[in-house]
Image (tube, rainbow, N blue to C red):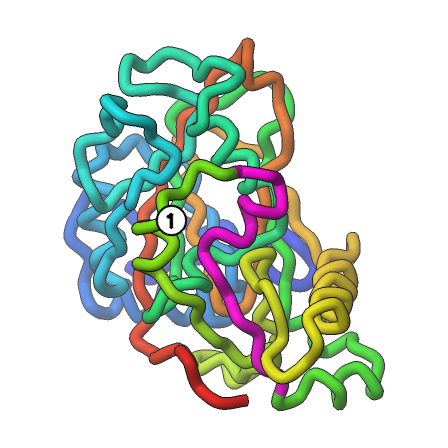
Amino acid sequence: MAISVKQLHPLFVGEVSGVDPRRPLEPETVAEIVAAMDRYAVCVFRDQDIADEQQIAFSRNFGELEHSPNYGRGKGQEARLKHQELFDVSNLNEKNEIYDREDDRRMFRLGNQLWHTDSSFLNPRGRYSLLHARKIPPAGADTQFADERAAYDALPAALKSRVEGLVAEHFFAHIRQQLGFTGYSEAQLQARPAVRHAIAQTHPGSGRKHLYLASHASQIVGMPMPEGRVLLGQLIEFATQREFVYSHKWRIGDLVMWDNRCTMHRATPFDEEKHVRDLRRTTVSDGAVALRNAAA
């Protein structure tokens, strides 16, 4: 049975029907989903009553999965979720209680409210992310997505020419350091050196040119740091204008899959001291090799 897709935004995002993530997928169905991702960049699967193991199995159809490092945990704090392939996108501790206001794990997750791209600081980087909603608050807590293909198309000619050939350095701690988060150990900082990515890229599936941006980008190689950071900020501001953005209002059971190579995303605030938000993310690694330590 072929899948069907209903477009949710004038530029991107498709709602997919005809897929049951609880069952093994035929190769033809996997290919159809990949084609939909190449076209829409964000795919929404509604009303998916799936367990953690089923989300992991479904995600593995698209490649090797990353393992969560569980940053932000203090001494003696356990991971809430038992599977390493699941990233805990919640405001809950290992006892399924809402974080205390000063909990480092809460401070760490505040970085999710900045525009970012999952695992841009890794080699290989993140290809797809899949986020499943288990419990959502009554208001707020949307996830916004920005189409970096459409943003590239709309760049003024002079700016499009300027970014061609530029390489940004992405560092895993940069996004939280901007917020004053100091919960990283020296070993963690040294274990993941910065990774370099071209700012203007061509998507391997669609063939479309796009920007590759994230708040993890700390500088532009070969450019004075203040100048590079100003340019990165200008590009992110341009790429996240209203016409390029889709805001997903979660329903329990939603499974949202997006392409990290050509989108950015961020979480929106909610009353996190009063309401529970419980989502679980799997991330598929990209096969492409980053420009780690490459010359500009």
Queried whether the magenta region covers residue 9, the answer comes back as no
Which three-letter amino acid code belongs to the residue tagged 1? Leu
Magenta region: which residues? 166-181
Residue under numbered circle 1? 130
Left or right: where 156 falls relative to 268: right
Q: Quadrant of residue 232?
A: bottom right
Residue 166 screen position, x and y as percent: 63, 84
Q: Nearer the viewer, residue 71 or 189?
A: 189
Residue 148: percent from left, percent from top: 63, 67
Q: Dot 1 surroundings within 10 Å: few (below 14), some, or many (20 or more)?
A: many
**Nearer the observer, 104 or 166:** 104
* In this view, 239 is above or below 21: below
Measured as percent of width and height from the top left, residue 116 is found at: 56, 54
Q: Quadrant of the C terminus?
A: bottom right
Q: Is residue 287 above or below residue 238?
A: below
State the image quarter where residue 79 is shown: top left
Q: Is residue 170 visible?
A: yes
Is residue 235 at all visible to an observer of this figure?
Answer: no
Q: Residue at x 78, y 53 (%)?
A: 242
Q: Residue at x 78, y 57 (%)?
A: 241
